[in-house]
Amino acid sequence: MSSALRFQVVGEAFKKQPIDVPTPAERPSEFFAKYVFNRQKMEQYLPADVYRKMIDVMDNAATLDMETADVVADAMKRWAMSLGVTHITHWFQPLTEGTAEKHDGFVEHDGKGGMVEEFSGKQLVQQEPDASSFPSGGIRSTFEARGYSAWDPASPVFVMGDTLMIPTVFIAYTGEALDYKAPLKKALHAVDKAATEVARYFYPDVKSVSSNLGWEQEYFLVDEDLYAARPDLLMTGRTLMGHDSAKNQQMDDHYFGSIPERVVAFMRDLEIKALELGIPCKTRHNEVAPNQFELAPIFEETNLAVDHNMLMMSLMKKVARKHGFRCLLHEKPFAGVNGSGKHNNWSLTTNTGILLHAPGKTPLDNLRFITFIVETLMAVWKHNGLLKASIVSATNSHRLGANEAPPAIISSFLGKQLSDVLEHLEQTTDNEILLSGKQEMHLGIPQIPEILVDNTDRNRTSPFAFTGNRFEFRAVGSEANCASAMIALNSAVAEALLNFKERVDGKISELAEKSEFKDGRHSATYHAIIEVLREDIKTCKPIHFDGNGYSEEWKAEAARRGLDVEASCPLVIDRYLDEESIRMFALTGVFNRAELVARNEIKWETYTKKIQIEARIFGDLCLNHIIPVATRYQSTLIDNVHKLQDIFDEETAKSLSSDNISLIKQISEHTSYITTHVSKLIDARRVANRIESVRDKAIAYHDTVAPLLEDIRYHVDKLELIVDDELWPLPKYREILFIR
Ligand code: ADP
Ligand code: MG
């Protein structure tokens, strides 16, 4: 763009007014889930016996027979048509970013030359999208299988515009998962089974356990016209160049400031639409960086929460455009200001309503609490490298390890109170703390307050922090599908709980032989639990770290503790193929080896593509935008030097032009650095592109291409400070980052 155009666009962006968002006539509680075929609507539209069957399908994963599916499909059709719906789509989460959909009309031939609105159970339950263009990491060719999508009745169908959206899993005919949802459901099933067994030690009436997820979505908003004037933002979601704005986040004024009016209008609009789609939005606020905001709904069952996050991300993009913004979900759109994450608040709850990660009123509750905390830590300790692998990406790498976000080492913050409790349990050797009888059982530990003080704000550096009644997995990227982290975490915890159960049961049988247990004076179960917990508290100690995760000392200390300290994204991805990971995913039934191999190929390919696109657009920007403008400005300076020589004597001209001569030199130094290194960048790409192995190619992109982008950027940003503002072709940080 020309600089004249830049000024015009900036000027206009600053003049834009908020658009009017009409207040809905109904209260939020009334329009909540208006566009969702939820239980309430099922009850209204389905015959009673079919409704009961569906409840069984949704709550107990009973199989859905075709007859029932037909009745349900017909009811959905009637409901959807009352909202003006004409199309249906199977909505799924392929391994690329975001969601995918294939729309079909509701119509069928009526056999008499006309059309009839038709939607059968078969269409509801299963479809065959043309899967060949979705990444499968070679699964489909290897297995010569086609992919199909199948309805996930645990996630209700909903209406967007004229389309009935059906949440589905996406799998190959040979059964391998081609998406995020299928393995997520398996992981949730695994943690349900394992946690239920363990919960029954404490509460025999527990029938199932579900996993909770409350995500906090961070994002940036930028004006649409300024966005359009930045080819790098447009193509990669981040700025590849741009000097710091004189003012950015150092005053912390954005965080506490009031939300700009145009943004408030956007947020209101977004919230209304999200509520109508059944997403329980609750909080919204400014974040640390200018133009950065956060939105968080109330936590939900993990499978549903993941769908809602995916839906929310696409909704955010849509609604932002209506308000003349672009919503940036990239983890690091701007250098020098905070990036965006998506804290995943996670916990487990029994069907009887007990929050397993929260302390309770009785010693029994507290033993249960400690059990679930310690076994979560065991999972995180054992699979810390894998958990990191579940959240790394080319884009999130800019955030991890930078001095603002979780470090690239997974550790867990527990806070003083919980640390003390664990330490006490570990060090008390007196097993007489177990008195006879369940209710009188006394742990001999200081009373655990029912609500642990949430002192996590004092430690924002921890990637996996305990926050009172849940863990907060903070390393997840803003753009990511939460499913990736949730698959790894829930499977790993399932494994830890299975292992715990096995050892406790073994100990119970051992103890049962002893007289004090035989005569019922002591409870073998609780005694066994405490002994196993004691071992585990010792074992998983390396994962516990309450200090400063950003410090250099921690990196060294973490390595000594045997934690995974690898920071290179393509190498971190290797953790999925560690024998420990393969065994864990096999035990929990989440992935087989072939799936893990195939999925890793996709991860490496995606990494390479992202850096490749960045490198291409960056090279173009340097050669077509930056160098010409810098050269033009340099010519003006040279011109000026000559003119000074024309009118002054040699000595005077020399002294008057010395500053300009210095600038001319600096410009030459920067431009020649940029030119030669853009050539190097192109060469590095060429070399990398010839590498056959997807893994090695990704490593080459990481080691040889990505660093050049940063190197060259330094010189471009220096030029931005030197070159006349009138000539600079790209909107600057100070213009993009402050919405009026
Ligand atoms: P923060 O102080 O981190 O902003 P909030 O209270 O706003 O925390 O909660 C952040 C998210 O965590 C919300 O989605 C909230 O519903 C969710 N959350 C709260 N308790 C739990 C829990 N026990 N398990 C899972 N998520 C939870
Ligand atoms: Mg939080």
Image (cartoon, rainbow, N blue to C red):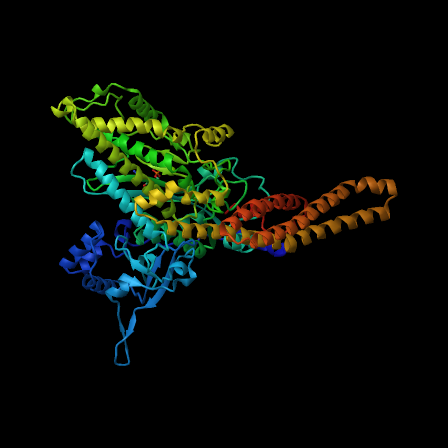
Q: Is residue 698 above or below residue 534?
A: below
- Horizontal and vertical percent position of residue 337: 52, 40
- Identify the residue at the far left of this view: 519
Residue 715's spot in the image, x, y percent? 65, 44
The image quarter containing residue 533 is: top left
Asked whether, in this view, residue 512 is left or right of residue 116, the answer is: left
Work out whether 305 lies above or below 408: below
Q: Is residue 283 in view?
A: no
Nearer to the camera, 105 or 135: 135
The location of residue 15, given as percent across then percent down, is 52, 52
Please say if 416 is above or below 493: above
Residue drawn at the location 32% of the way across and 43% of the way down: 491
Q: Quadrant of residue 369?
A: top left
Q: What residue do we see at 38% from left, 52% from top?
A: 594
Task: Please state if 557 lies on the left or on the right of 638 as rendered.
Answer: left
* Front-most of residues 305 and 11: 305
In the image: residue 259, left or right of residue 278: right
Quadrant for the N terminus, please. bottom right
**Ligand 2 shown in quarter:** top left
Residue 284: image location, x then y, percent = 38, 43
View extreme (right): residue: 649
Q: Residue furthest bottom?
A: 113
Write the residue at 42% across / 39% down.
385
Q: Is residue 467 visible?
A: yes
Q: How many marks?
A: 0
Image-quadrant location for residue 406: top left
Residue 712 as seen in the image, left or right of residue 547: right
